[in-house]
Image (tube, rainbow, N blue to C red):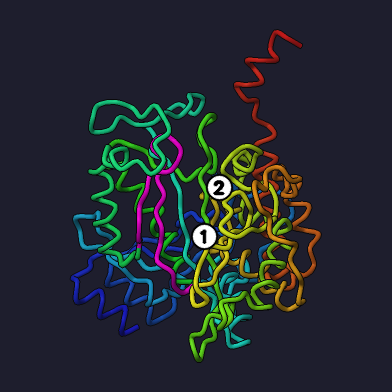
Amino acid sequence: MSTLEDFIRSRSITEVECLVPDMSGIARGKILPAEKFLRILRDRGLRLPESIFVQTVTGEYPEEEDVTSAENWDVYMIPDPETIRAVPWYTEPTAQVICDCLYADGSPVDISPRYVLQRVLDLYDAKGWQPIVAPELEFFLVSMNKDPDYPLVPPVGRSGRQESGRQAYGIDAVNEFDPIFEDVYEFCDKQDIDVDTMSHEAGAAQIEINFNHGDALALADQVFLFKRTVREAAIRHNVYATFMAKPMQNEPGSAMHVHQSVVDKESGRNLFGGADGSDTPMFMSFIAGLQKYLPYAMPMLAPNVNSYRRLVQGSDAPINVHWGRDNRTTGFRVPVSPPEARRVENRVAGADANPYLAIAASLACGYLGVMQQLEPSDPVKGSAHRLAFSLPRHQADALNKFNACKPLKEVLGERFVDAVSYVKQAEYEAYQRVISSWERENLLLNV
């Protein structure tokens, strides 16, 4: 309480945004005057309906059987003092703080994405381990589009022209949007969002931002806030920033690659690299856990119908769970690194994934591999795209696998798995009712 109050008083904050990431990673919550926020904190009176965690991406509540607790309709929002930050784009001094949610008896809301990540981290903590992660997030800048039937196109840059070709790592191509990225870096600096390098990706007006490595929960918080920040910065320049996994037909998809390692909490030693530079048995089992269980956790890494358009043969995205050394065609890449920096990069998750759930899924799969002392396949040399497709091909297949995996249910919580399935099945059924322009174009007069 004192930390929150000191922050608000010292910056003359007049309004507070209390944020709760929902299943899709959308910021929900409440906005209230700062004085009322502090007053309510003393009484633990800031409440929300538990059902916000089972809203679809369009804000609907599925009509089928509910997985929320009827007797716990209201849940309490508990601000995490470590997450309070000023919102840099408002003229009025405004703070934002990420909240955890508790039931009236003080127990955590187990279908909350932020809690699910914490639940996985607690398993590591019990072993004396700490996961370290570093996300890499891709996104597109696109011209404002008010008609959803009209394809997205790159925005006009400083030169007055749209980008027409592939400009991977192009410096001048990034500089076309300097005014946007000047705002992004300024906003990130003021929010203590620890972004590192920025580069142009393979798609037209596609950008990648790398985050510095650190604590998994703190990095998930930063990605959650970063998405909001980029969208705000772009819209100030009459441009959209989209984190869709596959926003444009002839362009590559956008990923959220997650580098992962595990250190000993007491010594800080990386448990994936041996003193002689070799990979430890724990590291090999972690990779094997990713290989075995990640196909079952796909609704947490590829949460939308659109997600599976990215995971196709001949693209930059993986299609299977093979691993390799510095091999960017595999699902799991081990970069060339000294033992103290030994890590594996999970390349499967899309940019559209909820960062809390994508990181939780990846760490849960690795944990299961370590606990079961699994052994990975041999590393792949050359393109992994020449090998069989082993990831789910669409959302319905992914949900079936997710519901069938008992070990993941034990790690993540059965109620949470039910909640994800409940929400994503409703979204899939809504999508199935939509008739696309492709169908009208190619079937209307031909069948």
- The answer to which of 87 and 62 lies nearer the viewer is 87
Amino acid found under the numbered disc labelled 1: Pro
Q: Say what secondary structure mark 1 lies in.
A: helix
Could you tell me residue 67's position as x and y percent? 70, 61
Q: Answer above or below: position of 380 versus 386.
A: below
Q: Residue at x 27, y 44 (%)?
A: 180
* Mark 2, residue position: 57
Q: Which residue is mark 1?
A: 355
Left or right? Give the position of 330 relative to 292: left
Inspect the image, locate mark 2, and give the three-letter code of the amino acid beneath it: Val
At numbered mark 2, what does the secondary structure look like: helix, strand or loop? loop
**Looking at the picture, does residue 128 appear above or below residue 83?**
below
Q: Quadrant of the N terminus?
A: bottom left
Nearest to the observer: residue 300 or residue 140? 140
Judge whether 104 appears above or below 186 on screen: below
Instruction: Examine the residues drawn in magenta and state their main secondary structure.
Output: strand
Would residue 189 be found to the left or right of residue 279 on screen? left
Viewer-nearest residue: 178 or 339: 339
- Can you tell which quarter of the image residue 292 is in? bottom right
Q: Indicate yes or no whether the magenta region holds residue 211.
A: yes
Q: CA distance from mark 2 to mark 1?
A: 15 Å
- Crowding at dot 2, Cα within 10 Å, few <14 / some 14-19 / many 20+, comes out as some
Q: Quadrant of residue 306?
A: top right
Question: Which residue: 67% across, 65% down?
Answer: 416
